[in-house]
Amino acid sequence: MKKWLILFLLIPALAYGFSDRYMETATSISSSQTVTTAQAYFYGAVINTDGANSVTVRINDGNATTGPVVWPTSQFAATPITQAISADPPVYCYTNINVTADSAGSYTITIYKREQ
């Protein structure tokens, strides 16, 4: 009887497989852009500066200028070189995650998200 119960509980996992689509993923960017093309949860970001120039970051749901604000315009100093922001609980974005960033130097931003 126990064997049948265990088999019955495993059937959905075996039938549908294990997909990473529902797991948190990271996307690194070095210019303003849309990071997802579908609905997603925004968990946070890591901002890496060049050590000499600050970076201004704004994150929206949908359009970069008119979409709902996920993370307000924030300026990150040149040092420390690595800085992070976190959304707890994660923010649900109905359209996509759009990152607007500006700096006189180079930078990378890693967005942590989970697409729906």
Image (cartoon, rainbow, N blue to C red):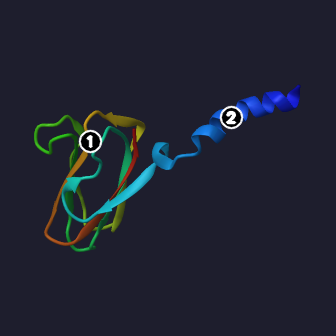
Q: At 20% across and 63% down in the image, what residue appears?
A: 31
Q: According to the image, label 2 marks what residue? A: 11
Q: Nearer the viewer, residue 11 or 112?
A: 11
Label number found at residue 96: 1
Q: Position of residue 32 (x, y in %)?
A: 18, 57
Q: At 30% across and 41% down in the image, what residue appears?
A: 38
| Mark 1: amino acid | Asn
User: Tag 2's secondary structure?
Assistant: helix
| Mark 2: amino acid | Ile
In the rendered image, the quadrant that contains the N terminus is top right
Q: Is residue 10 left or right of residue 31?
A: right
Disc 1 versus disc 2: distance between alpha carbons?
33 Å
In the rendered image, the quadrant that contains the C terminus is top left
User: Of circles 1 and 2, which is in front?
Assistant: 2
| Position of 34 relative to 93 (above/below) | below
Q: Nearer the viewer, residue 108 or 27?
A: 27
